[in-house]
Amino acid sequence: MDKQFKTRSMIFTLYGDYIRHYGNVIWIGSLIQLLEEFGHNEQSVRAAVSRMSKQGWLQSEKRGNKSYYSLTEQGKARMEEASKRIYRSESPKWDGQWRMLVYSIPESQRHLRDELRKELVWSGFGSLTNSCWITPNPLEEQVHRLVEKYDISQYVTFFNATYEGMSSPKELVDQCWDLNDVNAKYSQFIKEYSEMYYIDKNLVEKGDISDGQCFVKCASLVHEYRKFLFVDPNLPEELVPNQWLGDSAAALFSDYHELLQTPATRFFESVFE
């Protein structure tokens, strides 16, 4: 992953976890200062912000000679959805239905197909066949947003369906997602971050860690955990494997985040404009 994408990804994390709770607007100078804590330089921050503006995630306004950046409506909707999934306390309830999206996008608009695939994976859809995607979650709102965003209503058909066989719902899940791979990633996360959690808990209790260090650790934790949004389809309890580690990882993330949040927020507020 190139540095610019990492910078962009980190900016998303800061908007999701901090900036959107503070009026959703930040001076570029503050953003640069915050990202310097993670080793990103001014040039890479400006390049990432410019790219995010072109992609429709951010918008800028001038106040005097200062530039301020805020999330667009599209950016706000994405952060809202991400936040719900990152800070969820339990698996979604299942109504027994499947949402099915079928598209037929012409070869001349192949770039749209690629973009749509990325968005569908991010939202938690799984690919059943080449251009047929399914999810057990009620993602109607997200689908309508996508169709509008890419202006593809003439290429897309969307169903709310009942599965009639020929195998079990869990076997259907296995066709669309590699949950064993996701579970292995959760296992790795738990191993790595539970060790760090106990070390940092000790430091916080003794007062041996600065607000700035807590800010870096907290944002890095969210940044790392946020990657699961791209691989975990957030399936209902009935459809995940028996030894599923998603809930244990979520509990660890929640405890660790709570430990760091107050000092991290203090640091953010000292820099924020």
Image (cartoon, helix red, strand yellow):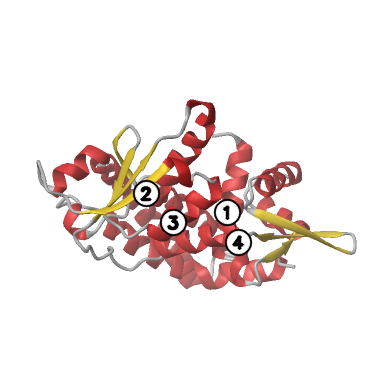
Q: Earlier in the sequence, mark 2 or mark 3?
A: 3
Calculate the distance from the C-alpha at mark 4 to the C-alpha at mark 1: 14 Å
In the displayed structure, 195 sits above or below 269; it is above
Residue linked to disc 1: 12
The mark found on residue 38 in the picture is none
Question: Which amino acid does the dot numbered 4 rest on?
Answer: Glu
Q: Is residue 121 visible?
A: no
Residue picked out by circle 2: 192
Q: Amino acid at mark 1?
A: Phe
Mark 2–mark 3 distance (CA, rounded to whole Å)? 33 Å
Q: Earlier in the sequence, mark 1 or mark 2?
A: 1
The residue that mark 4 highlights is 73
Label 2: few (<14), some or many (≥20) within 10 Å? Answer: few
N-terminal of the two: label 4 or label 1?
1
Outermost residue on the right side: it is: 64
The earlier-in-sequence mark between 4 and 3 is: 4
Q: Position of residue 150 (x, y in %)?
A: 54, 45
